[in-house]
Image: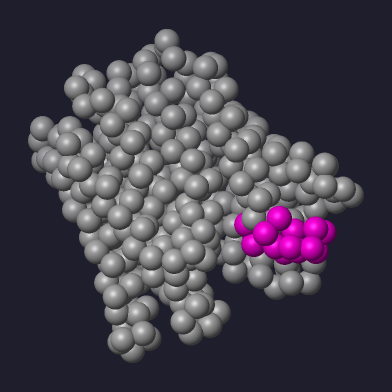
């Protein structure tokens, strides 16, 4: 049964938390770079990111076992905000290794912002509205990705990187009351830790969509590194490359807005959107002028938004209710690891040739599409007026 908790409140809290998360990464990077150089900045960001990739399965299992997952989620958000505040206050005043340790501990709570929120959606909306709710939920990620990094740059430039890190913590903290009021489970569930990994492997639809999205995230991570370098090479400023990322997010939002009004098979949409991302990345690698480059980036966004929304729809449909949070947070950790791998691989490639880096990113999308067989398992359409299983 749907909760009286308004889904609009969920969207407000999720957007605030995810914007703070998207702001925190660049802000922490700038905090280290501004004080101690690029190596320090990358080490802080790596600590935050790697820990996020590890913390998902444990956090998800704890949420699944709780009768009041929203309150645990709120505590996790408050802890993430406190960690950012501690890092800001102590950076430069304590040994650098300790500062990295604070970043690592803080990053362990990051999956609460992604998968921990999304796992609560089926308790908030009727089953027949789950498809549209998944699309709207995915749009909060895109909106956060659109606003967060730009806000980090503006705040760091105008007031300094410490202010940007604190602002990220404030946004995450604003989301805590929305999380606290999320509906409870009504009963304590007994799930084993790290059991979601087995479910992700054994369930065909989850296995296929997770393999596809993870490989795709490697390519997306590569593209995020290549776009600024490409902007500097072709337009004379890395800032133009950052604007390409803004264009990608806008196209993603528009595509999901259109998707929310249409019937679709999420299994097939995962594959088709991955193909669109690959074509867009390949087009950006060879685009001879600015107009075609912008069009190629927009096509990448048109694929990226629906891919995430469709992925959520598959997980909501296939994940066992008793371990839904663990499935989402584990999958979020895998995604973070894929993006981090793409970031690392793209560095040398982008330095040599950003076009080559984008071509390689397009290649990962081709591999990702092949990893998702056209057989889709359960292929019922998700539409605003049709039933879809929540479990």
- Where does the image place residue 379, in percent across and percent down from the top left? 51, 22
Above or below, 276 relative to 47: above
Q: Residue at x 30, y 27 (%)?
A: 7
Main secondary structure along the magenta-highlighted residues? helix
Query: Left of 380 or right of it: where is 318?
Result: left
Nearer to us in this view, 306 or 27: 27
User: Residue at point 64% right, 40% down?
Assistant: 301
Residue 230 counted in the magenta span: yes
Q: Residue 346 versus residue 162: which sits nearer the camera?
A: 162
Q: Position of residue 387 (x, y in %)?
A: 38, 14
Instruction: Look at 83% across and 42% down and name the residue there.
Output: 292
Observer able to see residue 225: yes
Tell me, yes or no, if residue 329 can be seen here. Answer: no
- Where is residue 51 shown, x and y percent of the image? 37, 66
Identity of the residue furthest to the top in this view: 385
Q: Picture quarter containing residue 91?
A: bottom left
Magenta segment: 222-240
Q: Is residue 132 magenta?
A: no
Determine whether, in the image, residue 86 is placed left or right of residue 247.
left
Q: Is residue 341 left or right of residue 81?
A: right
């Amino acid at each position: 049964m749907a909760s009286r908790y308004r889904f609009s409140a969920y969207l407000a809290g999720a957007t605030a938390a995810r914007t703070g998360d998207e702001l925190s990464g660049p802000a922490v990077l700038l905090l280290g770079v501004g004080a101690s150089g690029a190596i320090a900045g990358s080490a802080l960001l790596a600590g935050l990111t790697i820990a996020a990739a590890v913390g998902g399965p444990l956090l998800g299992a704890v949420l699944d076992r709780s009768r009041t997952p929203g309150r645990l989620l709120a505590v996790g958000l408050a802890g993430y905000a406190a960690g950012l505040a501690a890092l800001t206050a102590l950076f430069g005043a304590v040994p650098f290794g300790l500062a990295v340790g604070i970043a690592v501990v803080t990053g362990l709570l990051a999956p609460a912002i992604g998968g921990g929120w999304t796992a609560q959606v089926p308790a908030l909306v009727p089953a027949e509205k789950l498809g549209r709710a998944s699309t709207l939920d995915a749009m909060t990620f895109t909106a956060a990705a659109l606003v967060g990094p730009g806000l980090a740059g503006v705040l760091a430039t105008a007031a300094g990187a410490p202010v940007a890190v604190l602002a990220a913590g404030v946004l995450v903290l604003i989301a805590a009351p929305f999380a606290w009021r999320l509906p409870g489970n009504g009963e304590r569930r007994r799930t084993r830790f790290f059991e979601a990994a087995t479910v992700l492997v054994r369930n065909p639809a989850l296995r296929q969509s997770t393999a596809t999205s993870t490989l795709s995230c490697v390519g997306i991570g590569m593209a995020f590194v290549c776009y600024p370098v490409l902007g500097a090479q072709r337009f004379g400023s890395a800032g133009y490359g950052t604007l390409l990322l803004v264009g990608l997010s806008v196209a993603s939002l528009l595509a999901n807005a259109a998707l929310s009004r249409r019937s679709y098979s999420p299994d097939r949409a995962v594959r088709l959107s991955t193909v669109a991302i690959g074509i867009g990345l390949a087009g950006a690698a060879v685009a001879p002028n600015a107009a075609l480059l912008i069009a190629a980036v927009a096509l990448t966004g048109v694929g990226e938004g629906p891919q995430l929304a469709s992925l959520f729809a598959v997980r909501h449909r296939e994940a066992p209710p008793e371990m839904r949070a663990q499935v989402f947070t584990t999958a979020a950790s895998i995604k973070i690891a894929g993006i981090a791998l793409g970031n690392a691989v793209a560095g040398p490639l982008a330095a040599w040739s950003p076009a080559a880096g984008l071509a390689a990113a397009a290649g990962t999308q081709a591999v990702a599409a092949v990893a998702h067989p056209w057989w889709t398992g359960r292929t019922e359409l998700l539409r605003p007026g049709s039933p879809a299983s929540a479990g």
